[in-house]
Image: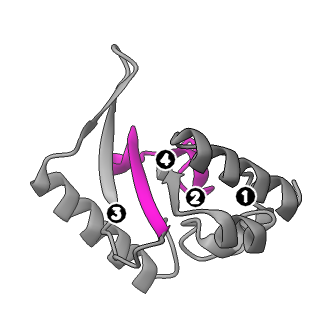
Amino acid sequence: VSQSRYKQLQSLALDLNIPIITASQLNRTTYEQTSQRPSLANIADSSIVSMCADVIHMLWRPDQSVKNLVGKNVGLWKNVAVVLTEKTRQGKHQEPMYYHLESMYSNFIPCPPDLVEQLQSEEQQSLLHGGFK
């Protein structure tokens, strides 16, 4: 999608006072990173997306995306989704939000604070040891 298309959509959204949500594909360089946690640089056409977007959220499912975890005992990370806020127009930094999938209801609920602390600790340990094992 070209920059002019994004600008047209943005103008339409402002005129109608409605939000526009778009999805973007990640490029494959994420798989080469140590943590395999997506970042703004991993978005295909990231310069256009980051220039036009007011907010950029990225959804990360470590138990699905980290090749070292797939098919193995994923422990705490099973059915966890992390919402990463990579950009806000206001410049406010937001901490990652952790959610757990209730597969019976196909619903994500916020993880309890003690589980979030454990997940953050495990992720930090994995980065110190060269990635998830």
Where residue 68 is drawn, which disc sits there? Answer: 2
Q: x, y percentage for residue 65?
A: 59, 51
Q: Dot 1 corresponds to which residue?
A: 26
Counting residues from the start of the chain, the first of labels 3 and 1 encountered is 1
Q: Would you place residue 7 above or below residue 12 in this image?
A: below
Q: Earlier in the sequence, mark 2 or mark 1?
A: 1
From the viewer's perspective, is the residue at label 1 or at label 4 nearer? 1
Callouts 4 and 2 close, C-beta under 8 Å: no
Tell me where residue 129 appears, x and y as whole percent.
44, 82
Q: Is residue 69 left or right of residue 4?
A: left
Dot 2 and dot 1 residues touching (CB under 8 Å): no
Q: Which residue ends up furthest to the bottom in the rendered image?
A: 128
Q: Is residue 38 above or below residue 80?
A: below
Q: Which mark is residue 112?
A: none
Q: Find the distance from the CA under tag 2 to the CA under tag 3.
A: 22 Å
| Tag 4: amino acid | Asp
Which quarter of the figure has residue 107? top left
In the rendered image, residue 17, in percent from the top left (x then y), is placed at 51, 42
Task: Quote the CA–CA distance across marks 3 and 1.
Answer: 18 Å
What residue is disc 3 on? Answer: 96
Which element carries disc 4, helix, strand or loop? helix
Taking the image as drawn, is residue 21 in sight? no
Mark 1: few/some/many CA within 10 Å (<14, 14-19, 20+): some
In three-dimensional space, the C-alpha distance between marks 1 and 4, rounded to whole angstroms, equals 17 Å
Looking at the rendering, the stretch of residues picked out in magenta corresponds to 63-87
64 vs 128, left or right, is: right
Residue drawn at x 18%, y 64% as measured from the top left: 117
The residue where tag 4 is placed is: 63
Q: Secondary structure at mark 1?
A: loop
The vertical placement of 83 against 129, above or below, is above
